[in-house]
Image (cartoon, rainbow, N blue to C red):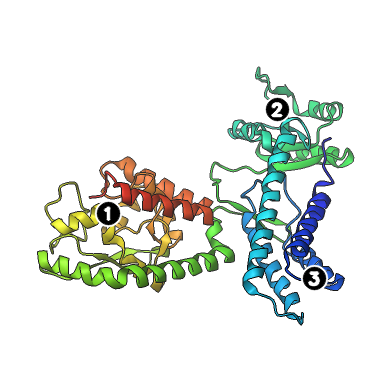
Amino acid sequence: MKRSDLIIPISIVVHLLIINAVIINLNPVDYFGWKSLLSINSFWLLICFFMEFYPTSRKERFFTNFHRFIQVFLLFCLGYFTVMAFKSYVFNRYEQFYILSKLFGYLLLFRIGFFFLRNRYRTIGGNSATVIVIGRDNNLKRLKQIFQQPDLGYRYMGYFDNTISESKNYKGRVIDSFQYAIENSIDEIYCYASQLSKAELHDIISFADKNFKKIKIIPDNKEVFTRAMDMEMFNNIPIINLRKSPLETNYALYGKRIFDLLFSGLVTLTVLSWLIPLMAILIKWESTGPVFFKQKRHGINKEIFHCFKFRSMAVNTDSDIVMASKNDMRITRIGKFMRKTSIDELPQFLNVFMGCMSVVGPRPHMEAHTSQYENSVDKYLVRHYAKPGITGLAQVRGYRGEIIEDRDIINRTRLDIFYLEKWSPLLDLKIIYSTVTNAISGEERAY
């Protein structure tokens, strides 16, 4: 079976069964009449409809729209408590939070099971789409690799091009694709616009329309496309946004800021409240100078802010232009311990609380280094599209501290851009976890 039109109806039915079973069986008293249950079910369906939760694309995976699953469930909780507010029975909120937690767990298990079974079904040929490509350019190999991912359910049959090739995937000239598409029940036709004339493209579109074949046009990319690009429509004019990041969504902007406020506030109250006086005594005991080291650094959109750290060096005139190196004579004894355990970075939670930094993001560099690398490292300034972080993907992957070789800053920039393009709450949590474990175990480049 190539199409699975029942996937969405089955998903809706299973979700409603889970919701009703949990609510009816786990509530301590029978105060949910049919009207209340109807309201709760209606809430779920309306939220899913307006959030476009069920229409799924072939390329969707477990984490693709996981944030939408969270949003839908949180909105459903609001609807659930709205219904509860109209009941005369005084409910125990802790019991209700327990019930909703169980409900979230069951819905999450269904989501896991759905994607697992769908992927298995596609690997044996179900829910598949048979495709051909017309035209050829340097991206054909990468497109073929995408088609050959089993969980996507594509069946790549080959390509057509007016330049004859001995490749086993070459099926003939452009004109031969029409008959081939009919004889082999092709579902989707992908066309490289840059390799086809206007007349050929019109003929292919006309053929596809008359024979119920989906046609998809691949624009001429001039090798400038990025992982983060997004297509926008201005009336009927397609516009390509090369730098759309998940961090630009309202979900990320507000969610990440709320997390930063809660996390930095917690650290400030439980750790910095007693650590600052203690470190002040130790730092002042060993050397003269301020407790905090304050340095101008570049943040989001290259805006300058003052980054706070515990002072780990003796006061010197090179601190704003020379990074700390191994066996650096400027580092004090207590400073060496702080840098090894990353304690010197903790005052940056004050920067996070004030809003000029985030818990996770690209590490901010001093002004001198930004001036140095913005012209020598490709796409270096792209990392300034997001707030800088106390920790980041590059740091947990081994690229922290001193820049010894060119590949250090190149790989750091590459990982920072990857973070911007592939951000998710789960990625932030993984980075935080890796940062804590690295600080406990000790890092070779923490000096």
Left or right: residue 396 compared with residue 252: left
> Vertical placement of 234 versus 217: above or below?
below
Residue 208 x %, y %? 83, 39
Foreground mark, 1 or 3, reads: 3
At label 3, counting other C-alpha atoms closer than 10 Å, the crowd grade (few under 14, some 14-19, many 20 or more) is few
The residue singled out by tag 3 in the image is 30
Q: Position of residue 286 (x, y in %)?
A: 10, 64
Name the residue tied to disc 1.
Answer: 341
Residue at the extreme front of the image, as rendered: 28
Q: Amino acid at mark 3?
A: Asp
Identify the mark nearer the N-term, 2 or 3: 3
Q: Nearer the viewer, residue 172 or 386?
A: 386
Please report contact status of discs 2 and 1: CB closer than 8 Å, yes or no: no
Choose the circle earlier in sequence order: 2 or 1.
Answer: 2
Q: CA distance from mark 1 to mark 3?
A: 55 Å
Given contact means CB atoms under 8 Å apart, are the residues at marks 2 and 3 in contact? no
Residue topped by disc 2: 161
Compare residues 238 and 80 and report the one nearer the observer.
80
